[in-house]
Structures are given as structure tokens and as C-alpha cells.
Image (tube, rainbow, N blue to C red):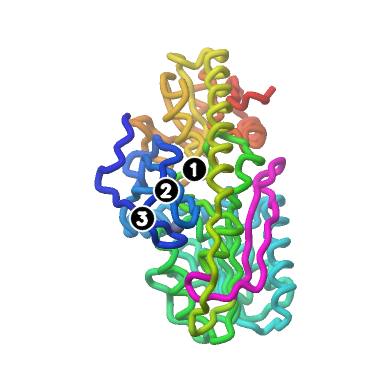
Amino acid sequence: MGFDPVAGNDERPCPVCGARAADTLHHRRFVLPDGHPLADGYSVVSCRDCGGAYATPLPPQEAYDRFYRDDSKYADLATGTGSGAQSWDDQRLNETACTIAAMTADRTAHIVDIGCGAGGLLRRLAALGFSNLTGIDPAPACAAVTSAIAGVRGEIGSFSSLPQLSKPAEFVVLSHVLEHVRDVGGAIDAIRAIMSASGRVYAEVPDAARYADFLVAPFLDFNTEHINHFSESTLRHLFTSHGWRVLDSGTKTIASSPVARYPCAWILAEAVDPMPAVLREPDRILRLELERYIAASEALLARVTDRCVALDIPGRDVIVWGTGQTTAILLADTPLATAQIRAFTDSNPIYFGRTIAGVGVVRPDELRAMPDLPIVIGSLLHGAEIAATISAHGLTNPVLRLDPYAP
Ligand SMILES: [Zn+2]
């Protein structure tokens, strides 16, 4: 399947500064579940004016609204990050809650978590004594799960249609949200409209300037959902150019699996009026770091390709465990695409009954009917966990891991 950069998708301006002149760093392709609303390919580009990095062209905003409403993987408590059902994820949420608590002494302040997923962060804030908590998420299932948490209100909404709040937000949390947003400027302007005059926002995003230092799976940071690649510097640039005062910012790492960590950048900002004149320094480092990440991803992809060949995967009858972001990339760029894939499966039920390249996605228990077929694990980040899950299901199929460092 060839990369088609037009196909009904629109070129985006830079999400940081609004400029339209950019240099292409990488073309990315995905093999997605059939009927998936998001783009099966885009370019990652670097803005010539500010150094911001982003994906373009992309489907219209409605496609993203539909995806986060109907296909949200975050509603599944067992597998979706943000619920805190997994201990490593719960620890991450608790760390973020403690960070926010240190920034917000008033336990009665109205805190609004936009893109709250299953509400795990709000649950942790409630445990720290905060009494006025609202979560907003485009997925009705996420809003319902959040509402079920004691002391937390869950609302359905997205940046283009934020719900009417009973009281203005005094502190807005955007935790791993802005990298998913197509119209970033519109989103942070929309937040201002629901905030009190002295309101503040805490935003945390993946730190694209350090992707190369935390490489686990090739190009995993260039996935279908992450369409903006911020550094601490471009995050500051974004908020100051929209009339916010930056109170603090920094970088950190968080757990992204039981064994892996992930780099983040964060900012604490308050809305000011009128917009101040700010000297905006372009970020000239981010592009170089992304080029380093791309080269490292290409090298890792070559090793995964070698592993596919060593495991005799081309032409072989297999089952693929994993319908997520890494599988979408491996099917596009490695010999996994040339295997005779008889079925896909996943721990997350969102794609059960759907198809990928015409092959059905079945429940793990349905694999009992195919006991002799090897299961290829289509995730490098969660390979060990999935191998344990396969055992826990009582499946005795041979397991093939594509991680070059796996046993
Ligand atoms: Zn720019």
C-alpha cells in the first residue's frame, strides 16, 4: 500500500506558531484496522519559523472527534493507560497528582482534567483531599467511568464542544492531551473560555527532544494519535504566543510499561490579558533530535526485519497478538506483512469483530481453536507482559517475539 499524502487530508499550519513553511523529516505509514477514521500515513515536518514539529496532512477534525468518541482505547480499564488499573500506571498518576497538589494549595479549587480518560488522575487527586473535581472526555464510556469515582464529576466533551461547567475552572489539567489535538491553538483558546480570570493550566506532553534517548519500538512516537511533537521550548512558545504567562516548565520521565520509561515536558501557565509582547526564540535543537530519533528508529526497524527473517516469518501461517500502534507500523515496514496472518487478537476488546487488511480480530479465547499456530507478539514495549498474558489464557501456542533483545 503506497503512501498517499493527499487522499482527502488537509495540510496543517504549524500548531505552535501558525506558519505554513516546513521541511519534511519523515514519511510514516500505518496498516490500520479496516474503517479506522484516522490517517494511514502522514509526513512529520519541522516548522521553518519556530522549529515546531508536527504531522501533516491529516483528516479533518471530525475524524478525530469520531475516533476519540467511538474508538477510545482509554475506556478499557484493564489495558487503557490513565485508569490506574495497572500498578505502574497508577504510580505515574499518583506522581502527577502530587505535582499538581504542590502547585495548588487550595483543596477546594475547581480542578478540571480535560481528556481525563478513565479518570485515574482525578481518583488520585480525590485521595489527596481535593473536593471539587471535574473530568471531561470525548468518549461517553470514559465520562461514565469517571462519574462513578466518588467525589468526581464526569462530562462528555472535546475542545470544539466543551460542556457548560457549573463553576469556572481554577486549574485545568492537560495530561498527555495536546500531542493528540489537531487544532492546538483553538484548544488552548477554548480552555480560557471555561476558566476563572486567575486560572492556571498544567500541561504535560511527550518530550520529542528526547524521543531518541527512550527508543523502544521503531517510530512508535510517530503514531496515529500523536500528531504534535513538542519540546519544553516549543510548549512555552505555544502558550506565550496565545497570551499566557509561563510560571514554570520542565522535563521529567514517567513509566510507560512495567520496565520502560518515557520522556515528558510540562508547563504551568496562567492566562493574562492583554497579550504580552514576548520574544519568541525558535527551537533549533528539536529538529536535530528528531533526525537522530528517525535514524535510530530506522536502525531498530532493520534489526526487527532481521529477526522476522530469522524466525522464518515471511510466508508462515501465524496469529498476531496486538492491534495497536506498533503492529500498525510493523505491518507497514517489516516482513510481518508477508506472513500468512490467520487472525489478530488483543487484550483490549475495542477491535474484536473488526478486520485488519481483511483478517479478523478475534478474542484471545478463540485462539484455542488454532493451538498449533505460532503467535507473533506485535508489541515491542509490552512483549513480556503479553507473553505472560498468553500463558495466563492457558494457550500453548509457540510465541514469537520481534523485539531484537527478547529471549
Ligand atoms: Zn512554527
The label nearer to you, 3 versus 1, is 3
- In the picture of the structure, the residue carrying the numbered disc 3 is 20
Left or right: residue 33 versus residue 374 is: left
CA–CA distance between discs 3 and 2? 12 Å
Where residue 385 sits in the image (x, y, percent)? 65, 37
Residue sitting at x 62%, y 33%: 383
Q: Secondary structure at mark 3?
A: loop
Q: Which residues are magenta?
A: 240-269
Q: In terms of sequence position, does the residue under pointer 1 or pointer 2 come before the other?
A: 2
Pick the quarter of the image with the C terminus: top right
Residue 171 or 287: which is nearer the viewer? 287
Q: Earlier in the sequence, mark 3 or mark 1?
A: 3
Given residues 254 and 252, the one toward you in this image is 252
Task: Say which of 205 and 148 sits in front.
Answer: 205
> What is the x, y in percent for residue 178?
50, 60
Q: Amino acid at mark 2?
A: Ala
Which label number is shown at residue 222?
Answer: 1
